Amino acid sequence: MTDVVCVVDAGTTGIRCALVDERGEVHGQHSRELAVDHPQPGRAEQSLPAMWEVTVGELRAMRAVAAQAGHRVVALTLSTQRASVAGLDADLRPVTPLVLWMDQRGASELDALRAAVDPDTYSRVSGMPLSTMPALATLVWLRTHAPEAYAASSSFVGVQEWLLARLTGGRPQVDRSCASWYGLLDLHAGQWSDDLLTAFDLDGARLPELRAATDVAGALRDEVADATGLPRGLPVYVGGGDQQCSAAGGGGVRPGAATVNLGTSATMVFPAAVGDVVDHAGFVRAAHVVENCVSVEGTIPACGSALRWLRTLLRYGDDDTAYERMSADARQVEPGARGLLFAPTMAGVGTPHWTAAGGRIDGLDFTHGPGALVRATMEGIALQVRDVLRHLPTDLAGPTLTAIGGGARSEVFGQILADVTGRAIEVPAGDPQAAPLRGAALSAWVGLGRYPDLAHAAGSPAAARRHLPDPTTVPVYDALYSRYLDVTDLAAA
């Protein structure tokens, strides 16, 4: 019988549950999609009751997997989306929908927020930009435009806090990796900022209780245990934000151990000690799931979404082998994609520029087929990774990047990343998409006493593949990067 932790990975597009042992190996997983509602242009919401219903169903499925395999579930924990927020009444019932991180309604409040606090001062305290991404802008929008719902909300919560409250019946709790995305956490003190709360006229009593990712949130409620088949009284650990959990699952827990998560977007996490963090313009700085550690983050808005768009455009199909065939076609094309440059910036240019832009294509001619288009897309993503690294202080990134997420499955993509960035690219053993599951589970194993802390638990995962830069491609990609800066109007940045 193997002891396992049950992990709920609650993202924007779905709920995934998995069983993970103390070595970080996944012993079974199951997922179900979540609907995203767009009631008006620029708005994005989800139903918390619907999310809970899906979560219960996925936990029930994991209990069946554990029973069939003879595993013993010893704890439950979470990895969740960040920066989304909803209001709850005193009985923990939703007063508002969950307003998602991508929602833009808070844009109308930004001028008032910037008048209340100098943006540079705000960034130094919270690590966040004064933008629509932290939940702060949504909270102020609710106060201004939905005053009745705002007044009826006894607490404001994100996904982690909502699920923990439903699982345990306790007061809303949040770990600091998710709390950062309220935009109200003093990153250096690790506490809600009284100065920011006062400046924005917000009530800190309505914010969740701050906890560590490795803390016990409470025991599984009897009603939930009976509905899912999980043991009554099962300890529920707090867990953390999905990107920080992904970094921990890829070994990104110490300064210099950088990760790049090649998902729908690409998120680069550069761990840093709290005392070493300075204001890096254009980079988000959030608390890590590792205590006394900060996650300096760089974001490329379109990664997997760009490849998925190309898959549909070129009619590769939607079966399990589609991306394998795309990679095989890209492998047949030499570095530089026969002169084709594609900047897949359809969702804008991310860190550190944060500018709106459409995708840019340069050099397309009649000789370019599907393989060249796929390779150019991968190279375009890699060029954006190179640009993030160019603007990052050198002390935050070592000579190696650990690649996780769905894109890390492609060997040709891994080699392109190595050649374009000039860094070694390592892909951990196992499923690279399981990194958030592994990172969250390890936080519970620390809480259970199997490891002294999360840094020891995460360690340095064994690499299944290691891609080294090919020196013969240096002049090709140096020239391509210069073209990329010109085509995207970033040459002067």
Image: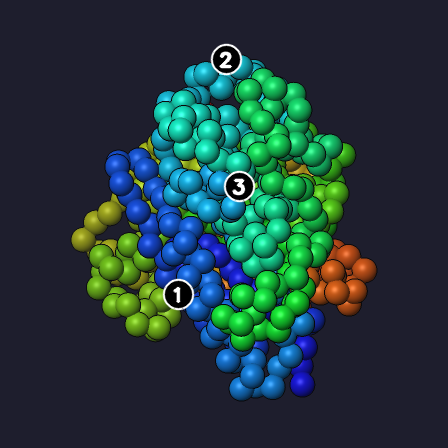
Residue under pointer 3: 90
Is any atom of residue 51 visible in this view?
yes
The answer to whether residue 189 is left or right of residue 226 is right
CB of mark 3 within 8 Å of CB of mark 2?
A: no
Q: Which residue is mark 2?
A: 115
Total marks in image = 3
Residue that appears at 38% across and 56% down: 50
For label 3, the SS is loop
What separation in Å lies between label 1 and label 2 (alpha carbons)? 43 Å
Label 1 or label 2, whichever comes before in sequence order:
1
- In the image, 325: left or right of 260? left
Q: Nearer the viewer, mark 3 or mark 1?
A: 3
Q: Is residue 221 found left or right of 35 in the rendered image? A: right
What amino acid is found at the position of numbered circle 2 in the picture?
Answer: Ala
Tell me the kind of residue under disc 3: Ala
Residue 155 coordinates in the image, percent (x, y): 54, 38
Residue 178: numbered disc: none
Q: What's the residue type where badge 1 is placed? A: Arg
Of residues 166 and 474, the one drawn nearer to the viewer in this rendering? 166
Q: Which residue is the site of mark 1? A: 32
Residue at (73, 47) in percent of width and height:
291
